[in-house]
Amino acid sequence: MMKKILHYFFKFITNPERASEEIAEDKSGLWAGLWWVIIFCLCYSFTVLIFYLLGHVPVTKPFLLIPLERWYLIQTFTTLPVGLAGFLSYSGLAYLLYKAAQGKGDFDQTFAS
């Protein structure tokens, strides 16, 4: 699976149109897309954990009532679920708009690409 994930990563950089077609035709494309979301969110979580350990605080006051000195610690643990929810809701909206325009794909293809 890791080989396939890296293949799509480089394919989206070099030829995004062809990569979208390939991943839409791939039966395991949904899993490749889901793994990229998880990898991205985990890398981001690791980054904000480093920010917390180094003692950084946000430059501006966040809109949530979380103490500034704990913001990055809390963000470390909320990035994955919030990131997954964001990607799923974006894919769902894109899929609904696609279907409204008489598109022929399914949700798996939309989320994967």
Image (cartoon, rainbow, N blue to C red):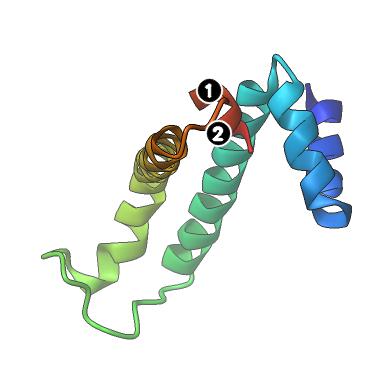
**Position of residue 12 measured from the top left corner of the image (x, y, whole percent):** 79, 49
Q: Residue at x 49, y 51 (%)?
A: 45
| Residue 1 position within the rendered picture, expressed as x and y whole percent measured from the top left | 78, 21
Which residue position holds label 2?
110
CB-based contact (under 8 Å), mark 2 and mark 1: yes
| Quadrant position of residue 72 | bottom left
Query: What secondary structure is found at the residue carrying circle 1?
Result: loop
Q: Report the front residue among 42 and 25.
A: 25
Seen from this angle, which residue lies furthest top? 27
Which residue type does callout 2 highlight? Thr
Give the image location of residue 29, x and y in percent. 68, 24
Helix, strand or loop for disc 2: helix
The residue drawn where x is 82% and y is 28% is: 4
What amino acid is at disc 1? Asp
Q: Residue furthest front?
A: 102
Kindly identify which numbered label has been placed on residue 26.
none
In the displayed structure image, the side of residue 19 where residue 59 appears, left or right:
left
Residue pointed to by mark 1: 106
Q: Is residue 72 above or below residue 16?
A: below
**Res 14 visible:** yes
Left or right: 83 in relation to 104: left
Quadrant placement of the C terminus: top right
Q: Position of residue 64 (x, y in %)?
A: 15, 64
Question: Could you tell me which residue is drawn at 68 percent across and 28 percent down?
Answer: 32
Q: Residues within 10 Å of mark 2 (few under 14, many from 20)?
A: many
Distance, label 2 to label 1, CA atoms, is 7 Å
Q: Nearer the viewer, residue 30 or 58?
A: 30
In the rendered structure, the answer to whether residue 18 lies left or right of residue 59 reads: right
Q: Residue furthest left?
A: 65
